[in-house]
Image (cartoon, coloured by chain):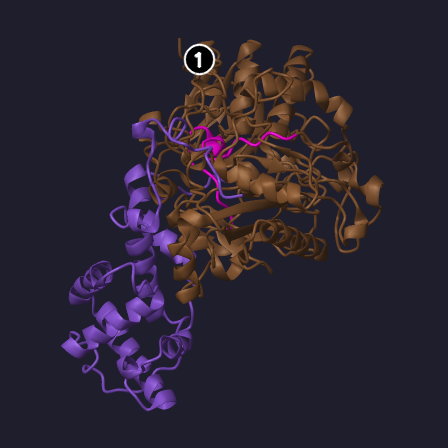
């Protein structure tokens, strides 16, 4: 009879630790990275400059546009967290700088302009669609999905109530009221 | 009061899993004086741990061990490691379920007889009928507190969101529109309070108004002194003797130590991915293809229901989050009528999503972004939507297999979950999209979003019952055709998926199985 090997117990702590990462992975497509332009090594791992950061914010606002609803702050908060990660992770720094270089190359190729100089939002979305399956794009998209829509401070702007048990649910708060049909 | 049994006690029934099947078995057996041990892979949560927060609870309760999605369904790309959306924790997926408690229709037990051979499918009749199961449905409804005639408990009041669906449905000529049956207390019952329309039913009911084995069957079983519940105990394999009878299980305890619990009978109730996986992982020299698998059907015929979502922006405010997650159902398409382009039928179920889940599932996967998505989310309070739940035909190639190289944290081969739609599924889904468009157009809505299947919360069929041993894994009692003292007590028993949400039927089958098993033990047959 076979005696199965034991490796790790299912401790609650270990489980929680992997949860968010596993979750994001499950939402993302793990793709073979699209072909990237050949650039000299070393030049890529440098921290992003001010222009690149401005472009990154434009990209973020183009992924989930809320022109009239949200100011830059929640987008920037997501990007700042990724930039902090890049400071200690050469892989993330590389992902950002290479991803932005790739994006600019595509913008130049299609519109002869930097990404940020493309004025029509639908044209910028078109450029982003060409990189949507890259790890670079998915990292930013995944951060924004949580940072914008799983962000309790923003829920009132979207008309979403969030937790209700503390105040007794909606049974006495018009859960059954509707008058428009 | 709480029992503590010895690892070498070979008089016990060992139950693997504590959800609708395992939790019910535990209580039913314990009430009859049969001693049992429940081994639950997950943690014990209490009502204090439950939050009204979609992603926080997703992290707390979901089964997130290593799994792979495969086959032709979109999830193989968009949810590569989350084929199923079910629970790892005490109470199993009864913590997550929405409470919908519909009985199977008579024809759903005999789809082969009703429709004949369906090309490309592997459909057989159930070895039981509605008439045989009906008394156990009654018992299940009384146990669970299902609104409706059997309990006498009224259905829940209609939420604004359900009134929207109901009005649209009425305008296109539908009439089977009800706010139940739901196993959610509409009045105080069984020491559990009435629903307060909090929402977040699928994140765990904060009040305990929704039936879950976590706070009903399991504590009741323990109170008899006949049942011990061990959490954080992952069963790794089932062992057997030279005659082929099972003798116990090997499991990893909370500290990761390997333990061996002897047993007189083993009941597997780990849901339709883990249950066949355990049987396959228990392969031995005597059973090289896994336990109970002389038919080769263990892990096969995996069914998830044909599912889809439809969300639409209404002309007025709805606030779908205010009230129960599934506030009502429409059953005008639940019948079997091949003239629609498909056999079997589907139920339209009102389903509220919060902003967090809607953002992730409106357009799921890596391409779900852009002005269309963000624009829709800005209209959250105007949105209403449904989940479509229809019969999924058994196909042999839809299956659970063991990954050849990838292992989970216990060192066991990880499951690969294959699912490809049958053309019948595609036709049924498209029909449901058309009907929902009519409903929402009738309400003046033209901004409609069709969603593909979510990771499956209804998982069925991978150890199916069959009249003939060559067609399936279990007999009509959920007992292995091959091994008399090995039972399967969860939804993997299902011969067909039917269109109803599976929990009520799992509970009815478990009540019936416990009665049979206790009798067989008393008669000395097992």
Can I make out residue B247 in this image? no
- Looking at the image, is B181 positioned above or below residue B74? above
Q: Numbered disc 1: what chain?
A: B
Question: Residue B146 versus residue B286: which sits nearer the camera?
Answer: B146
| Residue A84 belongs to magenta span | no
Estimate the x, y position of residue B96 in percent, counting from the top left: 46, 35
Question: Residue B489 versus residue B72: which sits nearer the camera?
Answer: B72
What residue sits right under mark 1 in the picture?
B191
Main secondary-structure element of the magenta-colored stretch: loop
Residue pictured at 39% horizontal, 38% vertical: B61
Occupied quadrant, residue A9: top left
Occupied quadrant, residue B289: top right
| Residue B94 belongs to magenta span | yes
The span picked out in magenta is B83-102
Chain that is coloured brown in the picture: B
Estimate the x, y position of residue A21 in percent, counting from the top left: 33, 53
Question: Residue B45 versus residue B229: which sits nearer the camera?
Answer: B45
Residue pictured at 69% horizontal, 45% vertical: B296
In this picture, residue B185 sits left or right of residue B279: left
Q: Colour of chain A?
A: purple
Estimate the x, y position of residue B137 in percent, counting from the top left: 66, 22
Estimate the x, y position of residue B150 in percent, counting from the top left: 64, 17
Can I make out residue A36 in this image? yes
């Amino acid at each position: 009879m076979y005696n199965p090997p034991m490796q790790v117990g299912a401790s609650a702590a270990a489980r929680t630790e992997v949860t968010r990462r596993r979750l994001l992975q499950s939402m993302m497509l793990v793709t073979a990275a699209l072909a990237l332009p050949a650039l000299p090594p070393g030049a890529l791992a440098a921290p992003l400059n001010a222009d690149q950061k401005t472009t990154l914010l434009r990209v973020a606002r183009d992924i989930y546009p809320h022109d009239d609803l949200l100011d830059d702050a929640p987008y920037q908060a997501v990007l700042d967290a990724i930039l902090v990660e890049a400071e200690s992770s050469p892989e993330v720094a590389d992902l950002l700088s290479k991803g932005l270089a790739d994006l600019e190359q595509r913008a130049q190729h299609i519109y002869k302009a930097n990404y940020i100089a493309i004025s029509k939002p639908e044209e910028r979305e078109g450029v982003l669609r060409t990189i949507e399956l890259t790890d670079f794009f998915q990292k930013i998209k995944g951060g924004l999905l949580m940072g914008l829509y799983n962000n309790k401070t923003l829920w009132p702007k979207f008309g979403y109530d969030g937790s209700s048990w503390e105040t007794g649910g909606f049974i006495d708060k018009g859960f059954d009221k509707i008058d428009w049909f | 009061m709480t029992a503590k049994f010895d690892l070498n006690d070979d008089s016990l029934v060992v139950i693997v899993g504590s959800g609708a099947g395992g939790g019910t078995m535990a209580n039913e057996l314990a009430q009859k004086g049969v001693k049992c041990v429940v081994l639950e892979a997950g943690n014990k949560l209490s009502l204090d741990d439950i939050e009204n927060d979609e992603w926080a609870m997703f992290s707390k309760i979901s089964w997130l061990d290593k799994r792979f999605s495969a086959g032709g369904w979109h999830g193989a790309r968009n949810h590569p490691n989350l084929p199923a959306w079910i629970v790892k924790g005490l109470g199993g997926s009864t913590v997550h379920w929405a409470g919908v408690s519909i009985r199977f229709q008579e024809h759903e037990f005999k789809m082969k007889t009703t429709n004949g051979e369906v090309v490309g499918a592997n459909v057989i009749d159930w070895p039981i009928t509605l008439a045989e199961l009906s008394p156990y449905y009654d018992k299940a409804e009384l146990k669970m507190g299902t609104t409706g005639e059997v309990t006498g408990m009224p259905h829940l009041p209609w939420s604004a969101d359900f009134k929207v669906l109901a009005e649209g449905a009425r305008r296109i000529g539908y009439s089977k529109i009800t706010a139940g049956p739901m196993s959610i207390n509409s009045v105080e019952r069984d020491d559990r309070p009435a629903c307060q329309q909090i929402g977040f039913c699928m994140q765990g009911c904060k009040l305990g108004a929704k039936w879950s084995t976590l706070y009903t069957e399991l504590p009741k079983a323990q109170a008899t002194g006949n049942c011990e519940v061990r959490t954080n105990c992952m069963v790794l394999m089932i062992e057997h003797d030279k005659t082929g009878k099972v003798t116990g299980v090997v499991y990893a305890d909370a500290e990761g130590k390997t333990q061996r619990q002897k047993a007189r009978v083993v009941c597997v109730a780990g849901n339709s991915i883990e249950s066949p996986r355990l049987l396959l992982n228990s392969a031995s020299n005597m059973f090289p293809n896994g336990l109970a698998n002389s038919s080769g059907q263990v892990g096969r015929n995996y069914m998830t229901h044909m599912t889809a979502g439809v969300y639409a922006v209404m002309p007025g405010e709805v606030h779908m989050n205010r009230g129960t997650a599934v506030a009502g159902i429409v059953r005008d398409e639940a019948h079997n009528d091949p003239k629609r382009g498909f056999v079997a039928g589907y139920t339209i179920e009102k389903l509220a999503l919060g902003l967090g889940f809607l953002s992730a599932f409106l357009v799921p996967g890596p391409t779900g972004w852009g002005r269309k998505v963000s624009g829709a989310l800005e209209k959250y309070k105007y949105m209403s939507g449904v989940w479509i739940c229809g019969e999924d035909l058994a196909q042999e190639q839809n299956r659970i297999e063991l990954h050849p190289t990838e292992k989970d944290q216990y060192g066991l081969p990880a499951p690969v979950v294959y699912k490809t739609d049958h053309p019948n599924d595609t036709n049924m889904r498209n029909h449901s999209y058309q009907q929902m468009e009519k409903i929402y157009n009738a309400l003046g809505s033209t901004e409609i979003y069709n969603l593909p299947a979510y990771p499956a919360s209804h998982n069925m069929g991978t150890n199916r019952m069959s009249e003939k041993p060559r067609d399936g894994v279990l007999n009509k009692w959920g007992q292995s055709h091959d091994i008399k003292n090995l039972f399967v007590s969860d939804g993997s028993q299902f011969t067909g998926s039917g269109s109803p949400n599976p929990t009520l039927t799992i509970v009815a089958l478990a009540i019936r199985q416990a009665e049979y098993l206790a009798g067989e033990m008393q008669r000395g047959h097992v």
